[in-house]
Image (spheres, grey):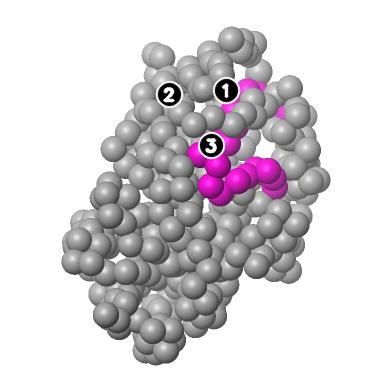
Amino acid sequence: MKKRCRVIYNPTSGREAMKKDLIGILDIMENAGYETSAFATTAEENSAQNEAKRAARDGFDLLIAAGGDGTINEVVNGIAPLKKRPKMGIIPAGTTNDYARALKIPREDPLAAAKVIAKGQTVKMDIGQANDNYFVNIAAGGLLSEITYSVPSELKSQFGYLAYLAKGAELLPRIKPVNMKIKYDDGEFDGKASMFFVALTNSVGGFEQIVPDASLDDGKFTLIIVKTSNLVEILHLIRKVFNGGKHVDDPRIVYVKTSKIKASSPGQRMMINVDGEYGGDAPMTFVDHKQHIEMCANTDQIPGSAITAETALAQDARDRFVHEMEQLPDDGGSEDESVNEK
């Protein structure tokens, strides 16, 4: 019996470029041996998620999520709870496209991305669960959530993670510490911190050095807690990130591998960002499902020595971001409070 592929695409992603390339994508997958059909997502809530679940239960062998990080997240949430899960491919057409970056999928050429899927190379990827929701890349609380919620959608569509840099430059001086209690496999953090990350890949907001030693299939999250809320110290940590990921050994950082995390914020609200969207408030439990979904990937380039080249525009924006931060007065950050790690 011929294998079946369902392309679940967001017709509004990437300035509607996906619709233009859809016929070519279908042709590539047909030539790869798949009987291929397509579904355009609608404004209905969980449109991509519901279609992914239906197609998986109908026996499709491969689901392709074509769109931004939100479309990918929905398709994953459609199939992750199922016992029998089809293979999954992604064709990026959104903003930062962090997951495509981690899998070495071409991010600006949908047809080239389809050709990678047609090659048939796969990785059994870890999938995260945050309470009842699944995620593929990152969950976070604190500053990152503020930045994500504050960037207008039209800016994200046009400028991707460059928009996050601009908003980050605006918000950093207003960082306030948050009461956090975070339990993980081998310990617990209890004190004030400015943010925490729960990462599955090495690509966070377009930056590949925040988690320089990320593994895609080891059953472990990378947990990062930024204990300081002092602006000058945060700028110093940012420079360490850009300078080869040297922040991982800094005493102002908790950097550990763990399969389970429980995060709460005693006495105050802490919103949690899950794959770029609001995912609920703490308390929240995160579980890493090891090698849960088989993803199409450009495995020839995935080894740690392979680094995706940064565009000149992105590199220039990053440099300007650091320069702008360096111009802020030394007393611009909020006063750092003592932090106890248990």
Instruction: Indicate the amino acid at tag 2.
Output: Lys
Residue wearing tag 2: 262
As measured in the structure, the alpha-carbon distance from the residue carrying label 1 to the one carrying label 2 is 15 Å
Q: Is residue 179 above or below residue 19?
A: above
Quarter of the picture holding the C terminus = top right
- Mark 1 surroundings within 10 Å by alpha-carbon count, few (fewer than 14), some (14 through 19), many (20 or more): many
Tell me the amino acid under the disc marked 3. Answer: Lys
Q: Amino acid at mark 1?
A: Ala
Residue farthest along the right direction in this orientation: 243
Callout 1 secondary element: strand
Between residues 90 and 226, which one lies in front from this camera angle?
90
x 53%, y 65%: residue: 297
**The magenta segment:** 209-233
Identify the residue at horizontal 55%, vertical 42% (top origin). Answer: 218
Is 186 situated left or right of 42 in this image? right
Categorize mark 2 by other alpha carbons within 10 Å: few (<14), some (14-19), many (20+). Answer: some
In magenta stretch: residue 310: no
| Residue 220, numbered label | 3
Residue pointed to by mark 1? 193
Query: Is disc 3 placed on a helix, strand or loop?
Result: loop
Q: Label 2 near label 3: C-beta < 8 Å?
A: no
Q: Quadrant of residue 57?
A: bottom left
Q: Secondary structure at mark 2?
A: strand
The x and y percentages for residue 156 are 48, 60
